Amino acid sequence: MQFDVMVLGAGVVGVAAALHLQKRGRSVVLIDRKGPGEETSYGNAGLIQREAYLPYTFPQGLDKLIRYAFNDQTEAHYQLSSLLDIAPPLFKYWQNATPERIERTILTNRPLFERCLIEHEALAAEAGITDLLRPGGWIQVYRKQETMAKYVSDSERLRAEFGVNSAVLDAKSLGEVEPHLSVQHAAGAIHWKDPSSLRDPLALTQGYADLFARRGGTFIHADAKTLTQSGQLWQVSGPDGPIIARDAVVALGPWSNDIFEPLGYDIPLFVKRGYHMHYKAAGNATLSRTVIDADTGFALAAMTKGIRMTTGAEFAHRDAAPTPVQVDRCEPKAKELFPLESRVEAEPWLGRRPCLPDMTPVMGPAPRHQGLWFLFGHAHHGLTNAAVSGRLMAEMITGEAPFCDVSGFRADRDFT
């Protein structure tokens, strides 16, 4: 079985890349151990964040670092047993939180966020699934005035420099926009108006995968870790024999290091783990937009299975046993904000966000292996930037002029 390109990883990023390669005349095979979108792409908050130019940075203030050290916060948690393993990339992450480096990150990632929604809308239209995209933005709620003041300042910058539309809401206005929120705990909110949201992120990835199949694409369940190079070709062991391609794209998210490390690449990939739980809403309570509690660190989103509560970041080894303490810590706070009733699942879902210290994905050729391409490290914005990243990857592989400068996404860049 021979193809022009094999894409390793059928999350939303890999599927989008496969679609864009296919549109440019390449024969493409998607390879994953599970079905499309069944890993990290399944469990997010379902936001395509057109406004997210300002990156999530490692805290620099001593007061916040001391609070995190006690490991009792809602928005962040760490596993002590994993700290030695994850300390080196976390230190680089901390180094990248200076104002100068943050501005570098913003400049590099800007083209992705500018086109993130446009590219998703185009793919969704081709797939016939535009009904999955819900316009109307999302709401960020603040319990503290000082938190709100910071984000209001950010919103003014985002409007002036990036054309991001938003509205500042006091508690009364917030209650009018979302009548079932308990606004007595809110100092106010910002309504980010430009993003779209999804009631079912998994359905989006599967919709893209269905389009890929209808256009003649091939999907095979196989182990990407069997990847080997033979001459100028790449090969993976498939259930019916070897799968061969001239180009191979590593789009395995948090599992990408299983491929690049044996090949000798030292890329400081780490994960921020996160959990979600679905709830029934009490009575006739509804939520028309995703709501994120900025001070507590959780999101509430109306999903197909119920109201999904997603947690902040857990710093732990990728494969460590689940420790979903953030779900238990956030649940009472979430119930203060919205009338959640019973849990829908027996256990919280665990996902892994693939992160890099400079808060910028790796996208481009592997420096020492012809025909090998890297596409991973989107952190909190894998869903957001999947479609636009897939386009960039396809442009690079096919020799088309990329629509933006791609030098900042190189695998051999300085991550500090």
Image: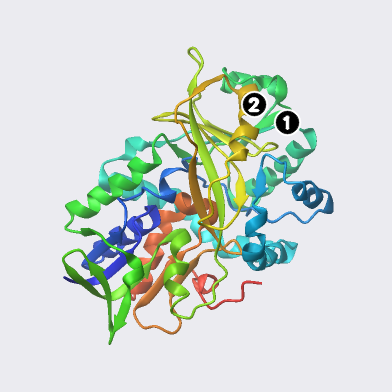
Q: In the image, what residue type sits under mark 2?
A: Pro
Q: Which residue is nearer to you in this view: 160 or 374? A: 374
Q: Position of residue 402 (x, y in %)?
A: 41, 70
> Would you say 369 lies left or right of 32 here?
right
**Which quadrant does the N terminus fall into?**
bottom left
In what element is the residue under mark 2? helix
Q: Position of residue 302 (x, y in %)?
A: 46, 29
Residue lying at the far top in this picture: please name it: 283
Residue at 52% x, 46% y: name it.
49
**Label 1: few (<14), some (14–19) or many (≥20) C-alpha neighbours in 10 Å:** some
Residue indicated by mark 2: 332
Q: Position of residue 110 (x, y in %)?
A: 55, 59
Q: Is residue 94 above or below residue 371?
A: above
Residue 323, quarter of picture = top right
Residue indicated by mark 1: 143
Residue at 51% x, 62% y: name it.
377
Residue lying at the far right in this picture: please name it: 63
